[in-house]
Image (cartoon, rainbow, N blue to C red):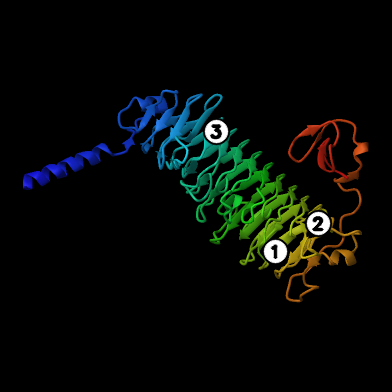
Amino acid sequence: MKKFYTLILMAAMAAGAMAQDFVSQGNGTVYTFNTLSQIDGTGVSLQDDGSYLVSADFTIAAGDVLQIVNNDVIKMANGVTVTIDGDADFAPADTALITRDAEGSNPRGFWMLGENGNATLKNLRVEYVGMCFGGVNSSLKADNCTFTLYNGKLSSSGTISFNASCDGNIIENCYFIENTLNAIGNGATNPVGIIIRNNLLWHNVTANRNKPQINLTCAGDYDVHITGNQVIGGQFTLSGGIGVSNMMSMGHTGVVYIEDNYIADNRYGITTIGSVDCVIKNNTMIDNCYETNANNGGSCVSIYDSSSSSNIYMEGNWMEGGLWGITVPTGAPNINLGKVEDPEAEDYNPGNNTFVNNGNGGVLYDLFNNGTATIWAQGNTWNVEEQTEEQIEEVIYHQVDDASKGLVIFMPAKTPGSSVEEVSAAQQTDGLYYNLMGIPSEAPTAGGIYIHNGKKILVK
């Protein structure tokens, strides 16, 4: 009997050994999915249709490279995770596809966790799976990729997520389409330096969770640039546009730049939470109002800082159709929406922010200062017939309405001669006009904002 049990134990140990995940040797080898399919025990196999099935987890060790070759089709089975402690060279010349192996499968995706392992993603279409990066001494570069239908199984931080602090990351010219969770994000304790530019984010957070489509922790000496993106929501009631935060009150010397983005149809447009230094400039925010309770959100821009240590600069933004224009729920952050008295001053700001039809409950709210700090807001165009002190006072909530709140200094308002000129469509007949989706036409096709000869044009 003792011998019998010994045989069973040996068989079980042998079976366990056979079931171990493949780990590469870390000797500088470049692995492709084709070469992995020729190695026993990797879980990668070549299929009759020329695709590669990944049926088991495997690890590429530090020092090695996992490469995707042009026209590769990689199908991942349910629950599968590929761990890369070395480099990820996912940059085929033209195209490659990563997807699930069958309807109903929920593969997890790629852990890129090597401290010195870089990741390059280019010309890829990625379906259902996530990408999580954690290279402390390295960076992730993504260009001309499509990420769609992410199932949320790899990380709750986003379709592309970061689980360690690192700098030099770039995500550009990519498409994030109908992912279950947000497109790009990181954890609350690991800020990253990153450039996110010229991407299209369309109807992400289909699970309707309390997440913005871009959701970043910003702290330390890392600068963050979120520029030139289109962030279009699916009119979901819980997911917002762009969120930057420092909820753990970490020290910071870096600056967040949110510039030249088109943000529409989200629960809210832009929110900052905690101690963050942020420049919000030349963004267009339209109909970010899909919050069911105005007391819980729906702002074009919300600045929440109970620590009273944020520095927020806003210039040249178009804010239209929100339940609120700008809200300051609490605290005393340093907010500069326009300070025009001394053009030579360090804190000079021409303002040029425009408010259009922001309100709820039948009341217009261009700026709601529920905090205690004085807010400078000169040089802006308010949602009133005439830019007079008496009329503007009606769309601002501040110390005049409640003595415990901070004062808003809003005069002088915008003067004639704005960079946004009101003209009729009939007057625009020369050159090309680019709408806010970047689509050109010989003349404006409807009312709205266009870019023409380097200027913003408002066509009525």
Pick whichever, 322 or 218, lies toward us.
Answer: 322
Does any portion of residue 29 appear in the rendered image? no
Q: Which residue is mark 1?
A: 294
Residue 109 is marked as: none
Pick whichever, 342 or 419, lies toward us.
Answer: 419
- In percent of width and height, residue 144 lies at 60, 33
Within 10 Å of disc 1 (Cα), the crowding (few <14, some 14-19, many 20+) is: some
- In percent of width and height, residue 431 lies at 85, 30
Amino acid residing under circle 1: Ala
Spatial CA span between label 3 and label 2: 39 Å
Q: Residue at x 67, y 45 (%)?
A: 231
Q: Which residue is mark 2?
A: 357
Amino acid residing under circle 3: Arg
Q: Residue furthest bottom?
A: 403
Spatial CA span between label 2 and label 1: 15 Å
Quick one: SS at disc 2? loop
User: Earlier along the polypeptide chain: callout 2 or callout 1?
Assistant: 1
User: Earlier along the polypeptide chain: callout 3 or callout 2?
Assistant: 3
Q: Which residue is mark 3?
A: 125
Amino acid residing under circle 2: Asn
**Residue 270 figure quarter:** bottom right
